[in-house]
């Protein structure tokens, strides 16, 4: 405990780090306050707070702003969607591949295109948002057309403002701003869910069960941390080069290939597709008993059919997303260009094949483990945990929280080490995703 307070004292004794932490807290407070500002012309008493499905997932990411018809009702999610689209296009479209290779100027152009695409996605999503989530009786304006046009503009402006907050957190604060906004929205629902689970669901008679649930949650979090941190290091030897009177190279480095290189993207993709069976079955449910059975089965997230299909999709998307984000041939070419080689493996195609084989072997257990974490909330609900608290036992929410917290702690520790203070842990360095970049 003494070490903990000493570390906190060291953190706030560094002026730059103290300012960055206070800036981050201030921007997050602004973001949270904005999530409670309701759209003009909406009666909040008439809104339905109980949302489920993909809307429930979005509401979790946005800290309840989605169900409250807030000016931040779309949050940062349109920007995330635009970023995913641009990331996929850099793999398939030669123009974006060229931009990516142009360095800083190319990244600036891609960021500009991402912002423009975000505005377009916002305008499209705002129409669906106003139609699907705001009932007619909740609209108090006499002119529905004026309400929809003004709300579309406000929702788009709210998303742009959250983008600005995220960029300011990255520049003036600590951690990745966009990820921080998603994480704070998820964490904001944890206290109420925990209180509801312990006090209202279990009560005093279920105190032992509540303790067991918290212990199980702790074990799940530790397993998720292990999945996020796990890497397979490939040794790389660099040949010695004599330049003038100096000798360069000759040292051994490592390529850290992550066991879960795709992050939360496979879960997001799979969760998006899991609504299709029930949606398509609903069209023919009155004409076919099979369609009605499919619709009922795949609308229940606790059914074994739903969880089996969900797990298979996650495994497939993990291999797909890893394949498009990590290019073994490019890694091998970069190593060969810089005079590096894997001991015992010839440079070039054999090195690329070796890296690809290693990546395939570590992606399989990583994808299975990711699928298990994704379906854990369903098992938690089967065990008697309330649905609001069960979402913290796995899935996208838990992976985002663990990843963002590790990144933030790693940045704080780097400030401490630069000022010659001890790190945050006695057993070793805090490893975030920034340390797992390919060497």
Image (tube, rainbow, N blue to C red):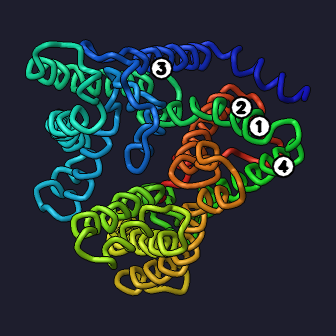
Tell me where residue 244 sits by quadrant.
bottom left
At 90% from the left and 29% from the top, the residue drawn is 1
The answer to whether 215 appears left or right of 158 in the picture is right
Residue under the image location 28 percent in, 46 percent down = 81
First in residue order: circle 3 vs circle 2: 3
Q: Residue 265 appears in which quarter of the rendering?
A: bottom left
Q: Are marks 4 and 1 in contact (CB under 8 Å)?
A: no
Residues at marks 4 and 1, CA–CA distance in whole angstroms: 9 Å
Q: Earlier in the sequence, mark 3 or mark 4?
A: 3
Disc 4 residue crowd, few under 14, some 14–19, many 20+, Cα 10 Å = some
**Against 369, is 416 above or below?**
above
Nearest to N terminus: mark 4 or mark 2: 2
Percent x, y of residue 382 = 66, 61
Tell me how far mark 2 sits from mark 1, CA to CA.
Answer: 5 Å
Q: Name the residue that disc number 3 marks.
A: 32
Task: Identify residue for label 1.
Answer: 198
Q: Nearer the viewer, residue 366 or 353?
A: 366
Q: CA distance from mark 3 to mark 2?
A: 20 Å
Tell me how far mark 4 sits from mark 2, CA to CA. 14 Å
Q: Residues within 10 Å of mark 1 (few under 14, many from 20)?
A: many
Give the number of the disc on residue 195. 2
Tag 4 and tag 2, C-beta contact below 8 Å: no
| Residue 340 appears in view | no
Label 4, on which residue? 209
Secondary structure beneath dot 3 equals: helix
From the viewer's perspective, tell me whether residue 302 is left or right of residue 138: right
């Amino acid at each position: 405990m003494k070490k903990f307070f000493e570390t906190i004292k060291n953190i706030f004794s560094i002026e730059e780090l103290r300012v960055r932490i206070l800036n981050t807290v201030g921007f997050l407070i602004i973001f949270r306050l904005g999530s409670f500002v309701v759209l003009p012309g909406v009666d909040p008493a008439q809104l339905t707070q109980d949302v489920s499905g993909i809307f429930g997932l979005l509401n979790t990411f946005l800290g309840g702003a989605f169900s409250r018809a807030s000016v931040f009702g779309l949050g940062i999610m349109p920007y995330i969607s635009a970023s995913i689209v641009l990331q996929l296009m850099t793999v398939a479209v030669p123009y974006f591949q060229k931009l990516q290779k142009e360095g800083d100027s190319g990244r600036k152009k891609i960021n500009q295109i991402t912002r423009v695409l975000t505005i377009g996605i916002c305008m499209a999503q705002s129409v669906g948002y106003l139609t699907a989530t705001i009932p007619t009786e909740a609209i108090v304006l006499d002119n529905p057309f004026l309400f929809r046009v003004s709300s579309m503009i406000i929702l788009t402006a709210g998303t742009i403002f959250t983008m600005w907050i995220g960029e300011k957190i990255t520049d003036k604060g600590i951690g990745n701003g966009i990820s921080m906004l998603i994480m704070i929205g998820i964490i904001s629902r944890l206290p109420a869910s925990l209180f509801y689970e312990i006090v209202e669901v279990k009560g005093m008679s279920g105190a032992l069960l509540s303790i067991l649930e918290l212990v199980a949650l702790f074990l799940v979090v530790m397993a998720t941390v292990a999945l996020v941190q796990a890497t397979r290091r490939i040794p790389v030897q660099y040949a010695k080069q004599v330049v003038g009177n100096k000798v360069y190279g000759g040292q051994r480095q490592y390529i850290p290939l992550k066991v879960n290189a795709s992050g939360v993207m496979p879960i997001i993709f799979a969760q998006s597709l899991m609504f299709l069976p029930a949606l398509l079955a609903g069209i023919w449910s009155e004409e076919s008993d099979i369609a009605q059975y499919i619709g009922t089965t795949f609308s229940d997230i606790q059914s074994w059919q739903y969880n089996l299909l969900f797990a298979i999709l996650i495994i497939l998307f993990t291999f797909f997303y890893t394949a498009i984000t990590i290019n073994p041939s490019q890694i091998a070419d970069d190593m060969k260009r810089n005079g590096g080689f894997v001991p015992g493996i010839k440079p070039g195609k054999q090195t690329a094949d070796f890296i690809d084989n290693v990546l395939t072997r570590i992606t399989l257990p990583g994808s299975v483990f990711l699928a298990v974490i994704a379906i854990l909330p369903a098992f938690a609900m089967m065990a008697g945990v309330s649905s609001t608290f069960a979402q913290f036992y796995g899935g996208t929410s838990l992976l985002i929280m663990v990843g963002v917290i590790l990144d933030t702690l790693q940045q704080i520790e780097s400030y401490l080490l630069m000022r010659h203070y001890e790190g945050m842990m006695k057993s070793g360095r805090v490893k975030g995703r920034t340390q797992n970049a390919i060497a």
